[in-house]
Image: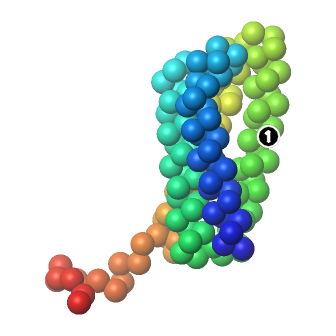
């Protein structure tokens, strides 16, 4: 199960790198503002790194649903964005990059907070390190 989290994270990071390489073309096709595209790409990259970290540490099966929901909605937002782009609507960039940014942020928060976050219980409360 851990491999799935790592693989999904690697794919997201590769997509982020590819989007950086082809940013002018993607921006012009989707009529997206540069600030939104860059913010979404950075969040996608960090989300992928978070998934890799989570997969290497825990990789619990109960969290696969969040990846499935994100990936399914990403497909839906991609279809919507392409339809909007074909009719030359500036909503295309906001739909696609907006979902990618907010969804990536949500995934990163899920995998880094609560029970999934760092375990501070092993550290002493007086600030000294455990040796």
The residue positioned 55% from the left and 18% from the top of the image is: 33
Residue ID at (64%, 14%) = 28
Front one among 76 and 6: 6
Task: Specify the farthest residue to the top.
Answer: 88
**On screen, 126 above or below 50?**
below
Left or right of 44 in this view: 8: right
Local packing at callout 1 (Cα closer than 10 Å; few below 14, some 14-19, many 20+) is few
| In the image: residue 44, left or right of residue 128 | right
Camera-nearest residue between 93 and 28 = 28
Residue at the (65%, 22%) spot, across then down? 26
Image coords of residue 108 (percent x, y): 54, 55
- Please state the horizontal and vertical placement of residue 84, each as a whole percent of the image: 78, 18
Q: Quadrant of residue 19?
A: top right
Q: Is residue 25 above or below residue 110?
A: above
The residue beneath circle 1 is 75
What is the quadrant of the N terminus in the image? bottom right
Percent coordinates x, y for residue 77 in the rendering: 75, 34
Image vertical order of residue 129 relative to residue 15, above or below: below
Residue 27 on image: x %, y %? 62, 19
Tell me where residue 111 sits by quadrant.
bottom right
């Amino acid at each position: 199960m851990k491999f799935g989290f790592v693989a999904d994270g690697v794919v997201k990071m590769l997509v982020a790198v590819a989007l950086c390489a082809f940013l002018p073309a993607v921006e012009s096709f989707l009529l997206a503002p540069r600030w939104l595209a860059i913010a979404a790409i950075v969040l996608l990259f960090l989300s992928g790194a978070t998934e890799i970290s989570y997969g290497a540490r825990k990789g619990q099966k109960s969290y696969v649903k969040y990846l499935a929901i994100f990936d399914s909605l990403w497909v839906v937002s991609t279809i919507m964005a392409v339809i909007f782009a074909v009719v030359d609507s500036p909503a295309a960039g906001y739909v696609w990059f907006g979902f990618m940014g907010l969804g990536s942020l949500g995934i990163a928060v899920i995998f880094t907070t609560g029970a999934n976050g760092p375990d501070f219980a092993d550290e002493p409360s007086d600030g000294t390190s455990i040796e």
